[in-house]
Image: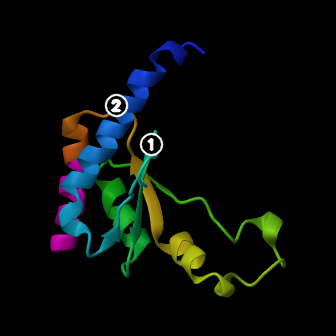
Amino acid sequence: LAQIEDLPQIIRMRQASSNYLTDKLSSLADVMQLPTVRPDTEHSRMMFPIVLFDRDRDQLTEFLESRNIETRQMLPLTNQPCYAGMWDERDYPIADWINHSGFYVGCHQDLTHDDLNHIAETLTEYFKQ
């Protein structure tokens, strides 16, 4: 509740961070899916979602972590234990792709342009290898 008065500014800052990262990473759109915002909607990201098209997520996230960029795997869509035996994951190829190729980097309001540039430059460095 202590931050509720600051919520509009926090959301604007998160949106600005996300937009900044999206712009900086646009040259990598052939190797990763970047987040989009549908018309007439908004977001308030505290994490920036990335889904690789056909690269090893774990190798990339290890590379990022070794350069002090924290990552998190995306929340599993179809393979959570509570869904065990309810369906075959292979029947949902998009969810399976996201489960195995998606991850997050931070995008909260306290990240500076230096922090965001470090994320973008490190991702760019990885894909130049």
Magenta-colored span? 118-129
Q: Position of 76 compared to 21: left or right? A: right
* Residue 61: x %, y % from top left: 39, 62
**Tag 1: residue type?**
Glu
Q: Residues within 10 Å of mark 2 (few under 14, many from 20)?
A: many
The percent position of residue 69, horizontal first and vertical second, equals: 34, 49
Rendered image quadrant of residue 60: bottom left
Instruction: Judge by depth and name the residue closer to the eye, 101 or 36.
Output: 36
Secondary structure mostly taken by the magenta-highlighted segment of the chain: helix
The circle on residue 13 is 2
Dot label at residue 112 = none
Q: Amino acid at mark 2?
A: Met
Instruction: Indicate whether residue 115 is drawn in magenta.
Output: no
- State the image coordinates of residue 15 (x, y, percent, origin top left): 36, 39
> Residue 127 lies in what quarter of the image?
bottom left
C-beta proximity under 8 Å, tags 1 and 2: no
Image quadrant occupied by the C terminus: bottom left
Instruction: Name the image quarter holding the N terminus.
Output: top right
In the figure, 118 relative to 3: above or below?
Answer: below
Q: Nearer the viewer, residue 67 or 29?
A: 29
Residue farthest toward the front in the current orientation of the protein: 40
Between discs 1 and 2, the one toward the N terminus: 2
Q: Residue drawn 42% across and 71% down?
A: 57
Residue at 41% over, 53% down = 37
Q: Is residue 120 magenta?
A: yes
Badge 1 is on which residue? Answer: 42
